[in-house]
Image (cartoon, coloured by chain):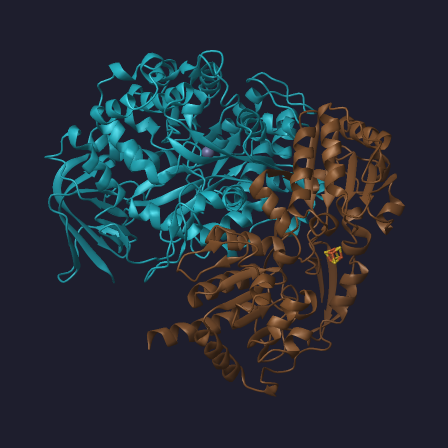
Amino acid sequence: MKELAIRNGYVFDPLNGVDGEKMDILLSGGRVVEKVKRGAEEIDASGMAVMPGGVDLHSHIAGSKINIGRLMRPEDHRRDQVPKGRVTRSGVGYSCPSTFVTGYRYAQMGYTTVMEAAMPPITARHVHEELADTPIIDKGAFTLMGNNYFTLKYVRDGDMEKLKAFVAWLLRATRGYAVKIVNPGGVENWKWGRNVHGLDGNVEDYGITPRQIISSLARVNEELGLPHTIHLHCNNLGVPGNYQTTIDTMDVAKTIKPRDERKTTIHVVHCQFNALAGNNWMNVRSGAPKIARYVNGNPHVTLDLGQVIFGDTTTMTGDGPWQFNLWNMTGNKWVNSDVEMEAGAGVVPYTFKPNNPANSVQWGIGIELALLVKDPWRVYMTTDHPNGGPFTHYPEVIAWLMSRKARTDAMNAMNKAVMKRTGLIDNYREYTFSEMAIATRAGTARALGLEGKGHLGQGADADAAVYRVNPTQWRPSQYKELEKAFSRAAYTVKAGEVVVKDGEVVATPTGATHWVNAKVPEDLEKEFIKDFEADFRKYYSVSLRNYPVEDAYLPAQRVHAAGGASP
Amino acid sequence: MKHEDVVCPFCGCLCDDLEVTVEDGHIVGVKNACGISRSKFMSHGLNRVSAPTVEGKEASLEEAVRESVGILSGARRPLVYGLSSTECGAISKAVELAEATGGVLDNTSSVCHGPTILALQQVGESKATLGEIRNRADLIIFWGSNPTEAHLRHITRYSGTAKGMYVPEGRKGRRIIVVDVRETGTSKMADQFIKVEPNGDFELLEALRATVRGVALRAEAVAGVPMDQVRALAEVMKGARFGVVFFGLGLTQSEGRHMNIDAAVGLVAELNRHTKFLLTPMRGHYNVAGANAVTTWQTGYPYAVDFSRGYPRYNPGEYTSVDMLARGEADAALVLASDPASTFPVDAARGLAKIPVITLEQKITPTSMLSRVVIPVATAGIEAEGTAYRMDGVPIRLRKLVEPTEGVHSDEEVLGMILEGLKGGAEK
Ligand code: SF4
Ligand SMILES: [Zn+2]
């Protein structure tokens, strides 16, 4: 059995209360253990920071949407060509990296688990084919449900039992990990070329509201006992003044009873795009303080940043009407892709410019959210890759959060609006190493309900990262060094195997795909299937038999139970 | 034994409701299929390549693989071509093989919907899965595409006569317009036929776009279409609740090529300011969408990918097979799931005849006849399973219904053997 000892590093394992203590981490058989045999492979981590492998809970890395991005942007690839290596495949990088390069680059930053945030059910096979081609990292995908015909129908009928059966069935059929909701009702209306505006707008043809969709799915999510909360992209994304919609949306889930251990009932994604105050793009201001005040007073909410990175990127969301607006604002190329019965998507290239007042404010909002939310366990670092910017820029975000000097230097190089229309300049908070570990692995793993991830306690998955930075000596003024350390892990260990050494990929094992096997009582399942089959036959363009994802698409899988039942 | 909901691997419609009866390892009956499909299913065992050959002489599989490895490792600029009529596992192996040999990878897009991709890279696209059109479209325009000949069940399953959620009446609930250079089977069942002058598509599309925008054009006719008719068509398009343009080779392979698609994308984008409007290519080869998808997620580019520098580069017109062959640049070729000798322009086909070719094929074809090595392979969707992507990007799993002849392997397996041989050689 392969064994490995990571010796003498400063370990940050917040889930187990370890805060920079010098200790050994021992790995055997893919798990963290108490003892290894003599002669086990050793890593000398003295003077370095050791953390659990990074866990990204929101990124767009696989499936039709990112592949449209890749397809439409040869000019983006040109800037980042990746040659074939001794153990690695060739490909391209930057904002729409090829699958192989995606796996390598996450691993190079010490990340070992990444969640694809939006999987349309009917093209779930596509997502899984790409995930299977994404090496090293463990992964999972969130199934889009907020504009699904059956969701809307059962919400309209007030039939929470069938909705529950449907959610469970669809997670199984798509091999999905969580319930994803994108602009609930808005994407459905977009199928007629329209949108909804706000929580109480009308979802045409159904006569229901986004509020009802969110509260129903949140309730069903908890009653099924799913490991993660609902994962929500709010209505009114990118509309100045939308912070109020965001707060109201969070409030919808306040009275929902969470599953046993978890206290949260809603995760709001890439919150920066939904934390805009002001009433148009000319006078847009930060709504982060208002959102943070709500989050600080309400323990049922978690959020991730969707931090902006300056430069050229490719925006892609399941929010068709928003992408249409963005196209109208930019005049850039636009792909719209509607998915029968279920979802939609749009892709538009976009450049965040430091000299643009609105963009500089957006940059400030992301950081401000991270600093103003007091509980580090409930705010996570993402760029909503590649919407705010490519994930490869995470080390810069880490530097901005851990070093006020890094932020000030950045702000001095951008439009002054960031000083006037966000409160960032007066914020002195700097993340500690432990808080950073929470925002990038411990907190995200906990939010996802991934028990083996995000920590280094006995029995945890043997995923770890060693960074070449001495936390006892590091000062915030040395943020460039920090950036470098987090860009190229000294070691990344995946399932007990060294996969990255000195920032270079040295092994490319296959990571597992995680999904949730949720169940409802048999008679409910039967009743649901009868209803479901009849409509499916009438309205889908594929046969039901050819719809669920076959096991052949998941070369390595980890099945998670819902509600504590065994899978 | 009866297999239900079988997927048809013969055109981009990828109908998945076939009923196939198998007795004693042979297909004896096919239901729900169109005529083309039925005859292909029933005759899939005829004219098969019976054994591997090297220089026209029968050889063992090992010898054929060894010869292939020799050809590819000795080549300076090998070309891997085809892909569009096999499943994604094989396509994935083909990408790896092109990478391993530092060669060029290309698929049939370069002779069919390549211009569609170029237009997408230029301006974008607004599309939907076929069920969306079936459920909602009240206006369907076939532009330079003729499903009654090329995609026989398209009209009944997905578009014209299909009943959908918001079009419960089917055909009666939809207006069908055909724009083409001549009358076709499709135009005969349409509500309106608009005859455009050959190579006049670009002009007509731009005139429509301007009219939708509210620009008054002074011309009396555009590309042979009277201005009144142009204005009326623009009104019909704007007034639709949900419209779609299905375009085919009539648009991508006529003068203007990707500029035509640019113009169509522009028109459809403009229409989205008034109503819902979409544009969808009618793809012929059943898995050309999959060939593009796999190649894109692995390399960043859909076709015409060169690996000679160790990383993928993309340049249609340079790394496309027809151009590579016509220039005499390729010095060896591996062809799978395609018959370029009969579909390529003459100078490209001539180029192919001059170099050593390895062909993976089920049947004897003009390409297999000029090949140095021929390896028989199983038919994906009948004798081998795997994924195919429908013309609208919906991935469906092809099934294995019967065993291939003893000793015959899938494309993926044969490519895997060649790849192993190449790697083994590299290590020595
Ligand atoms: S229309 Fe195409 S996919 Fe459908 S049965 Fe005919 S050949 Fe097969
Ligand atoms: Zn996202």
Question: Does residue B241 appear to the left or right of A247 in the view shown?
Answer: right
Question: Does residue A258 appear to the left or right of A346 in the view shown?
Answer: left
Which residue occupies 65% across, 70% down? B349
Q: Position of residue A195 (x, y in %)?
A: 61, 23
Q: Colour of chain B?
A: brown
Q: Depth check: A284 or B420 in front?
A: A284
Which residue occupies 65% across, 42% down? A529
Q: Quadrant of the N terminus of chain B?
A: bottom right
In the rendered view, would you say A381 is above or below B22? above
Numbered label tally: 0
Q: Position of residue A448 (x, y in %)?
A: 39, 36
Asked if residue A522 shows in the view, the reply is no
Q: Quadrant of the C terminus of chain B?
A: bottom left
Q: Position of residue A267 (x, y in %)?
A: 42, 28
Asked if residue A12 shows in the view, the reply is yes
In the rendered view, would you say A399 is above or below B68? above
Q: Depth check: A84 or A191 in front?
A: A84
**Image quadrant where residue A154 sits:** top right
Q: Colour of chain A?
A: cyan
